[in-house]
Image: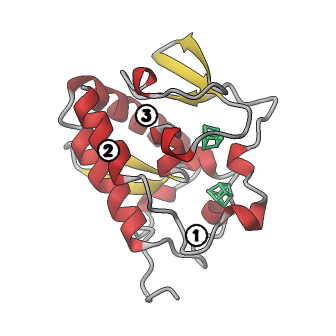
Amino acid sequence: MADAIERALALLEDVTPLAADCGQVCDGRCCQPSADSEGMRLLPGEQELLADDGFVFKDADGGVLLTCGGRCRREMRPFMCRVFPLFPYVDGSGRVRAVYDPRSFRLCPLTRNRARVPLRRDFVRAVRRAGRILMQDTACAAFLREQSREIDDINRLLTLTDERPPIARRKLR
Ligand code: SF4
Ligand code: SF4
């Protein structure tokens, strides 16, 4: 289990949604602690790999939640932070795609402006590849499927998965 997670995390170590630091535009909103956030959901078995003094772990329905103080060591950031605002979505036949996570809509300007601001191709590919690696692990596969069904539920209102893949069509400078 740890091996699949480590490989998935490593794939996402250096890639970022844009060539520039998107946090400069929104003041790093996805890292700002908020009163209505219940925390970041971790992959099954991921907690054991995360060692940062600022992390607090809490058992919850369906897994472990992480809360942070808005700062962490970059190499320790969890999977969900690495793929944000995308998610490796698993469809009914088990195929993995990188899609905008509709749960990022309220927070992230990249999701809201997705038609005008394409994401880096290597980031999108890394999210998809990481998902495929995690699908080789039974517990992580169950987690991705469960999260994907949650995305389906939200997308009955917001249809972000039906749009074209979030890849840059033009070479980004
Ligand atoms: S909220 Fe979106 S745009 Fe802002 S830092 Fe996070 S991923 Fe980047
Ligand atoms: S764990 Fe790190 S990357 Fe994730 S929200 Fe907290 S500070 Fe940001």
State the residue at coordinates (55%, 46%): 74
In front: mark 2 or mark 3? 2
Residue 57 makes an appearance in the image = yes
- Dot 1 and dot 3 residues touching (CB under 8 Å): no
Residue 114's disc is 1
Q: Secondary structure at mark 1?
A: loop
* Front in this rendered view, residue 74 or 110: 74
In front: mark 2 or mark 1? 2
State the residue at coordinates (82%, 29%): 35
Residue 18's disc is none
- Dot 1 or dot 3: first in sequence order is 1
Vertical position of residue 54 compared to residue 28: above or below: above
Amino acid type at circle 2 is Ala
Q: Residue 110 falls in which quadrant of the image?
A: bottom right
Vertical position of residue 96 compared to residue 46: above or below: below
Vertical position of residue 145 compared to residue 9: above or below: above
> Quick check: is the Cβ at mark 3 less than 8 Å away from ligand 2?
no
Vertical position of residue 26 compared to residue 6: above or below: below
Residue 89 makes an appearance in the image = no
Q: How many marks?
A: 3
* Front in this rendered view, residue 138 or 54: 54
- Left or right: 14, with 92 as reference point: right
Q: Secondary structure at mark 3?
A: helix
Residue 8's disc is 2
Residue 147's disc is 3
Amino acid type at circle 3 is Gln
Q: Quadrant of ligand 1?
A: bottom right
